[in-house]
Image (spheres, rainbow, N blue to C red):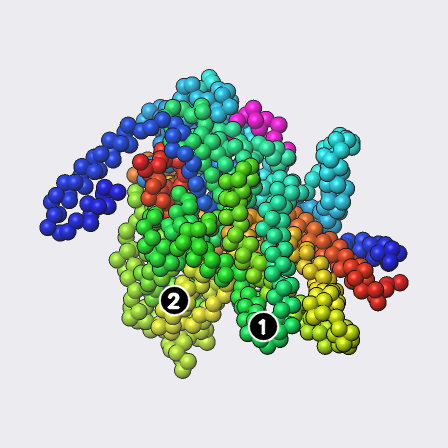
């Protein structure tokens, strides 16, 4: 209130204003330092327009489930809003320097904080971590986070406060198991009888896991609403500030934004996938603001390097079908990238939730390359036209370029989503300016991303020339992600059309560099190698990175302590949230 | 009449079996995948394991027979156990499990039923209560101002979709005036007068949206049916006998006009259970309609299958009820 009145002052009072603002800020800081005790701020109301189905992230894998459960169950360490690891249940992050990671990179040791308690009052021990690993690797359990425990040979407890993880082969980047919101520790006592095929039967445990986090589940209504109460055994006696929390689900993004920004019924709403201008109108009500965080999500255009011609029958989009008649020409791929005005796409479809990028690894800053920004970030229709002219692609009477009877006319597919369709229209128009014709197609997301090998419409099968989607990597290390463009990761009938290399890019040099990366432990060298790999993909036109996508959430102005995080659960520091006094 | 009802009930069994098979086959053929909504960071091998843990690798017919057993034998036994406290076998029966929540589908439905019945059911009731008087007056004073306005409003109510009226009401009454909440609180328990008031307040908007829609539909039926009857010979006879106009209208004409209307209303009852998908979604009532749409989007096939099948049962049942009611209300009609 005070701040608001002051900022209304006119220009001549600038100095006084600044001074007063400073004082107010200092007061606010002092206020938060002398924070009130646990449970004094009433009810925290959170809105997820996609309702939460279960509180066990090992059985779901969906972002909404991972986020919701992060209020209750915690990993050993998390990423903060800068993408740096912070210890949660441990005293420090193990590294080679502090002896936590062995020199041969074959094992790591986590030291648990003393006197940790589960919300039911029992002691938290290393046994629970061992159990969590066993739970996820149990056959027939269908553990959705199994990838986090990949390469783990064993988890042991030399003593109740020490967790020792041994790997099957040297792991230059060992922070995966028990790190981040996707692999939290669950209580052995509660889940002991729920391992493997018995997992789905434990409904009450899956809906109300006992945790070490700031809140515990009071009531869970699947796909509807969760009520939480503050955990009386939480390790920080002054937190959480809220006595209870409600996480309501359902509806759509626009109405969720309205409930925070306009009507003020809710304190926090996740994932505001709403047109920028709609959000701008809602913000005028002055009840809330948007929070943005950028992780590693990149909206990209995939270029098919194989021929997807339906006439090829079974050989369609496979190596046997041969290279793409037009897109195998590097000049065409570069021209397509040059013709795109990424700023316009951000402006119309993304607003605060996106920024132009030419990197497939856009963050964290240490591994984000800037090498190609000079030529790629700016639209250059002239340059693109010249490139195509020089390569022998001549415009026909219909304005479409062709060479040796091959026309630059492409089928461009993506999932059904208003922002994606708007982007398709824009790109189609930009490409028409360089004599490239495009036919647009959109496919329901559950089919396109469904991965059903029998469906011809999945993004992996890629029965089109061009396709658009977003992908990202978890955590801050891109090694596994970059390994997705190895030659042997190309989807084909032999591997059931699975594999991350949808663009069918294959370059032995790239493969060699990835192998080198997997053997390098030094962070600086790893970053340099990652950048090189990233640049190779952009320069050779394996794909066209478009937009670095952020997540946008809205919060009420009365809510304090939100530190929006693109690397972990958005609710990662919900223990620190409080009501503005 | 009794033999007729019995015959129809017996006929319903094969009908429902065929329906259940068609639903199952359609869902199975649909190119949907329960792991389709998961983040792309989850690798394909893990997705394969998830699918296997859901039982998807089994052949189609086996899965269908499992479902039949779970739905027709295990679930009724469970309900019976819960109602009577008896124990059948060891009590460990495979239940129909939702893929998204991994919990029994029937429990989800039971949890959702109250809010759907309250909101959608009440809206249906209000719709009928509003529609009948308007329909009667509109027909009696055909082409009067009242009739014109009534026709206009019902046309608007019928043709403007609920996703428009719903959002409009939220913008006016929640955002501007702040009279009613825009989000329905399914945790609210009515224990005293103030919580009762809160429940009323949060029901106003969704019930209003749906009532308008229901009322406009039924008004048209009442009006048309009244007009048919008003020009019948028996009306003239009644008037000629000197029966008072009120009695002519409300006793003779209305009663006869309601016969087709009652059937229409009975046929509409299953829609109460299937919920109002859009309205529930807009106001976050999270009843059966929202449950169905979330299940469809997430390819939660057991949940979709069970819900749609229950709706099919209700539709078959209420068709029968409508036919029987017709026979009872109109003595001229006899099924033999």
- Quarter of the figure with the N terminus of chain A: top left
- The residue lying at 36 percent from left, 62 percent from top is A348
Q: Residue B70: which numbered mark, if any?
A: none
Q: Nearer the viewer, mark 1 or mark 2?
A: 1
In the image, the segment drawn in magenta is A184-199
Mark 1 secondary-structure assignment = helix
- Quarter of the figure with the C terminus of chain A: top left
Residue under pointer 1:
B147
**In the shown orientation, is residue B178 left or right of residue B248?**
left
| Residue A324 screen position, x and y as percent | 47, 65
Q: Residue A426: which numbered mark, if any?
A: 2
The chain ID associated with circle 2 is: A
- The residue lying at 70 percent from left, 70 percent from top is B245
| Residue B251 screen position, x and y as percent | 73, 65
Question: Residue A579, located in which quarter of the rendered image?
Answer: top left
Tell me the crowding category of disc 2: few under 14, some 14 to 19, or many 20 or more residues within 10 angstroms, Cα based. Answer: some
Tell me the crowding category of disc 1: few under 14, some 14 to 19, or many 20 or more residues within 10 angstroms, Cα based. Answer: many
The chain ID associated with circle 1 is: B
- The residue lying at 69 percent from left, 67 percent from top is B246
**In the shown orientation, is residue A260 left or right of residue B134?**
left
Residue A179 painted magenta: no
């Amino acid at each position: 209130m005070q701040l608001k009145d002051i900022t209304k002052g006119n220009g001549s009072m600038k100095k006084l204003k600044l001074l007063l603002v400073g004082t107010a800020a200092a007061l606010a800081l002092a206020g938060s330092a002398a924070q009130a005790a646990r449970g004094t701020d009433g009810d925290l109301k959170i809105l997820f327009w996609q309702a939460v189905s279960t509180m066990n992230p090992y059985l779901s894998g969906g972002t909404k489930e991972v986020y919701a459960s992060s209020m209750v169950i915690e990993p050993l360490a998390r990423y903060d809003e800068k993408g740096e690891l912070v210890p949660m249940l441990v005293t420090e992050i193990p590294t080679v320097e502090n002896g936590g990671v062995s020199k041969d990179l074959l094992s790591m040791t986590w030291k648990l904080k003393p006197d940790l308690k589960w919300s039911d009052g029992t002691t938290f021990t290393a046994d629970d971590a061992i159990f969590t690993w066993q739970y996820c690797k149990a056959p027939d359990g269908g553990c959705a986070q199994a990838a986090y425990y990949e390469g783990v040979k064993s988890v042991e407890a030399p003593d109740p406060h020490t967790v020792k993880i041994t790997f099957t082969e040297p792991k230059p980047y060992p922070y995966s198991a028990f790190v981040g919101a996707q692999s939290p520790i669950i209580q052995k006592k509660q889940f002991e009888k729920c391992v493997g095929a018995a997992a789905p039967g434990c409904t009450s445990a899956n809906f109300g896991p006992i945790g070490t986090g700031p809140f515990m589940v009071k009531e869970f209504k699947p796909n509807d609403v969760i009520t939480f109460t503050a955990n009386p055994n939480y390790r920080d006696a002054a937190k959480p500030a809220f006595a209870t929390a409600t996480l309501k689900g359902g509806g759509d993004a626009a109405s969720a934004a309205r409930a925070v920004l306009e009507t003020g019924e809710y304190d926090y709403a996740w994932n505001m996938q709403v047109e920028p201008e709609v959000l701008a109108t809602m913000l005028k009500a002055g009840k809330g603001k948007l929070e943005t965080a950028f992780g590693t999500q990149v909206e990209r255009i995939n270029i098919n390097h194989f021929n997807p011609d339906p006439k090829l029958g079974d050989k369609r989009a496979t190596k046997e079908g041969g290279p793409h008649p037009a897109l195998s020409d590097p000049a065409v791929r570069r021209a397509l990238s040059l013709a795109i005005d990424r700023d316009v796409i951000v402006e119309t479809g993304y607003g605060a939730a996106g920024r132009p990028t030419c990197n497939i690894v856009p963050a964290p800053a240490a591994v984000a390359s800037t090498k190609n920004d000079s030529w790629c970030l700016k639209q250059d229709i002239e340059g693109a036209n010249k490139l195509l002219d020089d390569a022998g692609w001549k415009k026909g009477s219909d304005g479409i370029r062709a060479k040796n009877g091959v026309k630059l006319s492409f089928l461009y597919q993506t999932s059904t989503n208003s922002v994606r369709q708007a982007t398709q229209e824009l790109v189609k128009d930009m490409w028409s300016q360089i004599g490239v014709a495009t036919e647009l197609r959109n496919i329901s997301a559950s089919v396109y991303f469904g991965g059903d090998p029998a469906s011809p419409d999945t993004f992996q099968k890629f029965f089109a020339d061009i396709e658009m989607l977003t992908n990202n990597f978890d955590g801050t290390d891109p090694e596994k992600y970059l390994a997705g463009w190895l030659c042997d990761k190309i989807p084909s009938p032999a591997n059931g059309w699975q594999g991350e290399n949808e663009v069918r890019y294959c370059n032995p040099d790239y493969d060699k560099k990835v192998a080198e990366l997997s053997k390098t432990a030094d962070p600086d060298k790893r970053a340099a190698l990652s950048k090189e790999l990233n640049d190779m993909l952009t320069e050779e036109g394996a794909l066209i990175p478009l937009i670095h996508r952020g997540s946008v959430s809205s919060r009420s102005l009365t809510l304090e302590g939100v530190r929006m995080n693109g690397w972990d659960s958005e609710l990662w520091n919900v223990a620190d949230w409080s009501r503005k006094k | 009449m009794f033999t007729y009802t019995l015959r129809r009930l017996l006929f319903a069994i094969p009908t429902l079996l065929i329906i259940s098979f068609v639903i199952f086959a359609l869902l199975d053929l649909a190119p949907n995948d329960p792991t389709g909504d998961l983040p792309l960071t989850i690798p394909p091998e893990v997705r394969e394991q998830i699918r296997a843990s859901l039982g998807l690798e089994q052949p189609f017919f086996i899965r269908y027979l499992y479902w039949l057993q779970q739905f027709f034998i295990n679930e009724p036994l469970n309900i019976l156990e819960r109602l009577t406290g008896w124990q059948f076998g060891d009590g460990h029966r495979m239940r129909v499990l939702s893929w998204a929540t991994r919990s029994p589908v029937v429990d989800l439905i039971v949890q959702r039923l109250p809010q759907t019945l309250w909101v959608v059911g009440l809206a249906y009731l209000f719709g009928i209560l509003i529609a009948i008087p308007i329909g009667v007056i509109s027909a009696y004073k055909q082409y009067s101002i009242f009739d014109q306005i009534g026709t206009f409003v019902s046309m608007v109510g019928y043709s403007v979709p609920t996703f428009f009226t719903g959002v409009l009401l939220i913008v006016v009454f929640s955002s501007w005036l702040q009279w009613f909440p825009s989000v329905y609180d399914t945790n609210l328990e009515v224990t005293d007068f103030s919580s009762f008031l809160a429940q009323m307040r949060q029901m106003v908007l969704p019930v209003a949206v749906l009532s308008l829609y229901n009322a406009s539909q039924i008004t048209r039926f009442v009006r048309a049916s009244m007009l048919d009857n008003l020009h019948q010979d028996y009306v003239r006879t009644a008037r000629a006998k000197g029966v008072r106009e009120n009695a002519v209208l409300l006793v003779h004409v209305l009663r006869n006009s309601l016969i087709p209307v009652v059937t229409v209303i009975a046929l509409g009852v299953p829609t109460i259970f299937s919920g109002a998908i859009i309205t529930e979604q807009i106001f976050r009532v999270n009843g059966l309609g929202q449950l169905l749409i979330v299940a469809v989007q997430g390819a939660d096939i057991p949940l979709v299958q069970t819900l749609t099948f229950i709706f099919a049962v209700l539709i078959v049942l209420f068709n029968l009820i409508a036919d029987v009611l017709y026979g009872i209300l109109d003595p001229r009609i006899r099924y033999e």
